Amino acid sequence: MHVARIASLTALLSALIAAQTLGAQAVDSTSHGSKTFLTKRDLGIAGVALGATAFLSIWDPNIAQASQDSQYQSESLHRLALNISKVNETTLTIAGIATWGVARLVKSPDVADVALHATESVVLASVASQLIRGPLGRTRPNYAGDSSQYDFHPFKGFSAFKYRAFPSIHTSSSMAVATVITLELHRRNQRITPVLAPILFSAAILPGLSRIQLNQHWASDILAGAFMGVFAGYKVTTYSHDHPNNWFDRKLLHVTVNQGADGRFQVGFDLGG
């Protein structure tokens, strides 16, 4: 199977999961969200993602072996993949915190808002992914000979790097950031969404695809990571704006919620003098 087609298939499935997550949750946003962070609807969305991931895993060995073909393992491509893979949970978290800090100093509430929620989403997706990959203990393709995609070693993922394949945290982190930026910009300028969203999500899937090229992840790891990132980004952003009086926004963004004369609640930012 041609690697370009493989990449397209993985990206397409990731986009479908993103659309399913964002689309199926749209009803919640119109009703100012649920009182709880997770809802019953989320179980159905997770089921769709799990099914798509299991379906893609059938071709994991084919994709892994094709990606390691000599024509796709040139020095320049390998170097490019290494550089792209530097976009991970650590760099994105540091970048998010730094951006939030600068935005607070220069009194830019919109930038601080986006940066905080992006950072929260990356942390949430990363922690959730670690809690899955630790007990699951899925073997990475380079240690499984690119052929045994169902090689699991329960709970060894906590102690050994080679058993931490599923899901891809590189992918979950970048997709979480893309989701937050897309949703936050959509709240402010809906016209830009059809143009910006495809660019953001295309860029966000690159770290995951680079991990396939480096033989560190199966394609299904990437798809699962994409779902984790989109889901985390969506839940953090919508819950935060539906519940602006939450602890994180009050303490880190200095959000103020006041009830107007008409009974409606107004949200503002107390940035200090």
Image (cartoon, helix red, strand yellow):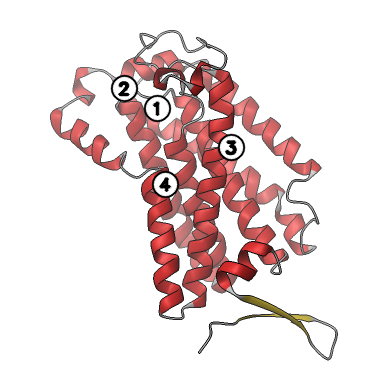
Where residue 209 appears, as percent x and y from the top left, is: 37, 34
Residue under circle 3?
128
**Residue 212 location, quadrant:** top left
Residue under circle 2?
67
Three-letter amino acid code at the position of disc 1? Ile
Judge from the rendering whether residue 187 lies leftward or rightward of residue 78; answer left or right. right
The image shows residue 19, relative to residue 101, as above or below, that is above
Q: Choose mark 3 or mark 2, whichever is in front.
A: 3
| Badge 2 density bin: few <14, some 14–19, many ≥20, Cα 10 Å | many
**Residue 120 location, quadrant:** bottom right
Three-letter amino acid code at the position of disc 4? Ala
Of label 1 and label 3, which has the lower sequence position?
1
Residue under circle 4?
204
Q: Choose mark 3 or mark 4, whichever is in front.
A: 3
| Circles 1 and 4: CB atoms closer than 8 Å | no
Alpha-carbon span between mark 3 and mark 4 = 19 Å
Where residue 39 appears, as percent x and y from the top left, is: 78, 45
Residue under circle 1?
6
Of label 3 and label 4, which has the lower sequence position?
3
Where residue 167 appears, as percent x and y from the top left, is: 51, 29
Three-letter amino acid code at the position of disc 3? Ala
Give the quarter of the figure containing the N terminus.
top left
Judge from the rendering whether residue 220 lies leftward or rightward of residue 98; answer left or right. right
Q: Secondary structure at mark 1?
A: helix
Of label 3 and label 2, which has the lower sequence position?
2
